[in-house]
Amino acid sequence: MLGSEEEGVCPSASNLTVLLRGVRHLRNLGGACPWVTKALVMLNKSLPKHPPLALENFVSQPDIKDKEAAVVAKLCPNLKKIHLERPEENCQAFVPDALGALLRLSDLKHVESLCVLSLDIIESMCCVRQLLAAGSHLTELTLMNVVRGPVELPYLAHFCPHLRKLCLRGFNLRKLAEGRDEYGTRKLRWDDGADKDDAQGDMRDKSKKRFLWPSLQTLELSPLLGGAVDRESLLEIVRGAPNLRTLDVGTSASQLSDEDVPALSPAGNKLVSLTLRRNANMGEPLRLTGRAVLGLLERCSHLTTLGLLNDWSVSEAEQAELRRHCTANNLRVSLLASRCGCSCANC
C-alpha cells in the first residue's frame, strides 16, 4: 500500500508512474494522496497503448475529473475495491465533477467493494445504483460521514440484495417503523407474505411487514456523535438478517435492556462476533446486566468474540460464571474500560 499521507510517505506522480510501469503485477495502490490518479494519467499519456494493469484496489479522493476517471477505468479494468475520500478541508461541499467521475467508474463490472467518505446520501446511493446497473455485484459497502439526509436501510437492502458487509460510520438512520408504509407501497425489501407482483400485496396490513436482508453477514453501526439507532430498528435488523455473523451496534447498545436479549439472539443465530457500547457522550449506561449477557452467550453458540465496552458492571458471581464459560467455550470477551476486574486470560 503506497501513497499514505498519514504515514508521511507520498511518492510523486512521476515516481508512481515508473513503479506502475515496472511492477506489472501490483494489485494495491492508493492512499489519501493526490498523486495516484495523476500517475495513472501520466502513464496513459506517455504510453497510450500500455496494457491494462493488475490493480484491484484503488484509493483516491473523489475530486477527480471525468477524463481522469475514464483513464482509471481504462488502465484498471479489474478493480474490485474502490475507496473515494473527500479532502477534509472541503468536507461539507460536494465537488461537482466528483459524481460524474464516480459514475464513469461504474463501467467497472468487477467492483465488489465501495467506500465513500463525506458524500450526500443521495449522491452515495446514486453511485451505488450506477455500479449495480453496470453489472457489478456489490458485496461490501462503507458509507462514512454521511451528510444531508438519513440512511434508509430498506432502500439499501432493495438495491444491494447481495451485500454481505455494510459499515455505516457517522450517520443518521431513519427509523424502520417510520418508513414502513412508504417502503411497503414501493415494494422495497419488506416481506408481507404476498407475491411481490401481486397488486393486492400493497393493500395488506403494513404493520405486519418485516425488514429482510438475508445476504447480510457483517453490520457495523457507528452513528453520529451523540446519536443512536433506536431499539425497535436494531431488533428488526437482527430479525431480518438471519445470517449475521458480525454485529457491532456501536453506542446504540444503550438502547437495549435485558428483555431484548431473546430478540438480539434469536434461535439458530450465526453470530460469531458481537460488540456493544454505551453512549458515553449522552451519559447513558449500558443497561444489560451481567446475568443477561451470560444468557446471551448461552444463546449464541457460535460466538467467539464479545465486546462490552465502557463501564459494564459485573458481580463476583457473574465474573466466575463468565470465566467458566470462556474456558469451556474458548470464548474471547473484551471488557475494555469496564469494572469487571476479571483475571481470566480470555478476558
Image: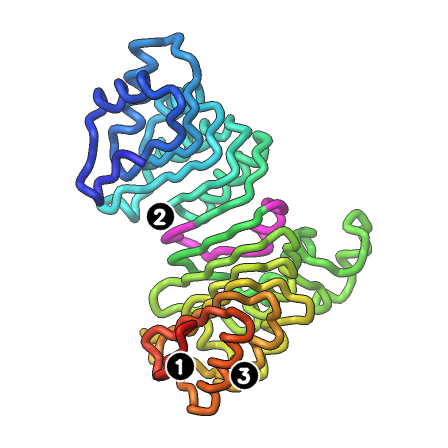
**Relative to 315, does residue 212 appear above or below in the rendering?**
above
The percent position of residue 21, horizontal first and vertical second, equals: 32, 16
Task: Write down the residue under mark 2.
Answer: 118
Residue with the mark numbered 3? 292
Image quarter of the C terminus: bottom left
Closer to viewer: mark 2 or mark 3: 3
Read off the magenta span: 143-162
Q: Kindly tell me whether residue 153 is visible in this rendering.
A: yes
Occupied quadrant, residue 116 = top left
State the SS at label 3: helix
| Type of amino acid at the residue the image marks with label 2 | Ser
Real-space Cα separation, disc 2 to disc 3, in angstroms: 38 Å
Residue 273: which numbered mark, if any?
none
Asked whether 312 or 40 is in front, the reply is: 312
Residue of label 1 = 312
As measured in the structure, the alpha-carbon distance from the residue carrying label 1 to the one carrying label 3 is 12 Å
Q: Amino acid at mark 3?
A: Ala
Is residue 183 in the magenta section? no
Please report the residue visible at 58 percent of the width from the left and 81 percent of the height from the top: 295
Q: Is residue 168 above or below residue 113?
A: below
Q: Secondary structure at mark 2?
A: loop
Q: Which of pointers 2 and 3 lies earlier in the amino acid sequence?
A: 2
- What residue type is disc 1 on? Trp
Residue under the point 47% across and 86% down: 320
Q: Where does residue 97 sit, x and y in percent of width and height? A: 35, 31
- Callout 1: helix, strand or loop? loop
Dot 2 alpha-carbon crowd within 10 angstroms: few under 14, some 14 to 19, many 20 or more: many
Residue depicted at 55% across the width and 56% down the height: 153
Sort mark 3 into few (<14), some (14-19) or many (20+) by Cα contacts within 10 Å.
Answer: some
> How far is mark 1 from mark 2, CA to CA?
33 Å
Tell me the crowding category of disc 1: few under 14, some 14 to 19, or many 20 or more residues within 10 angstroms, Cα based.
many
